[in-house]
Amino acid sequence: MAKHKIYSMSVASVYPHYIKKAEKKGRTKAEVDEIIRWLTGYSQEELEAELEKQTDFETFFKEAPKLNPSRTLIKGVICGVRVEDIEEPTMQEIRYLDKLIDELAKGKAMEKILREYKY
């Protein structure tokens, strides 16, 4: 089966759209970056380097330093599909990111977006 075209797209080509979507709703680039770092474990410097290198989505997630174990708490529908039901791992990671950016644009608090537990 052929891979979805998003896998070969660079993260840098989509990143400005994440920023624009957030800023249109009064959120910031810093919040977008925080979400990406939370999800993937990249530092800010590593994230910027990946964007500079035009890393594709498949490689970006495959080589992520530490995918956040709490990402499995992300639930809901993105592009008409429930993220928790996506079986292909790379596509699920991409859709997790899409869902988090959607939540940011909808005004959700960062603590809730980042699934922070209060013990």
Image: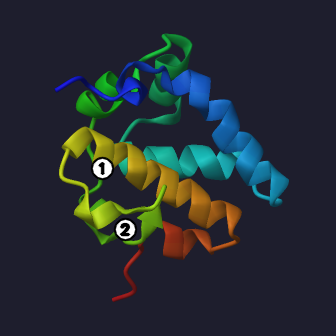
Tag 2's secondary structure? loop
Tag 1's secondary structure? helix
- Mark 2, Cα crowd under 10 Å, few <14 / some 14-19 / many 20+, is some
Q: Residue at x 20, y 45 (%)?
A: 88
Q: Residue at x 67, y 46 (%)?
A: 30
The kind of residue on which mark 1 rests is Gln
Residue 17 figure quarter: top right
Q: Name the residue under label 2.
A: 74
The kind of residue on which mark 2 rests is Ile
Q: Can residue 48 be seen in this view?
A: no
For the C terminus, the image quarter is: bottom left
| Residue 66, placed above or below residue 64 | below
How many numbered callouts? Answer: 2
| Residue 79, placed above or below residue 110 | above
- Mark 1, Cα crowd under 10 Å, few <14 / some 14-19 / many 20+, is some
Q: Residue at x 51, y 68 (%)?
A: 113
Locate residue 12, reporting x and y percent: 57, 23
Residue 5 figure quarter: top left
Closer to the camera in the image, 117 or 60: 60
| Residue 32, placed above or below residue 104 | above
Locate residue 64, reporting x and y percent: 30, 34
Q: Name the residue under label 1.
A: 92
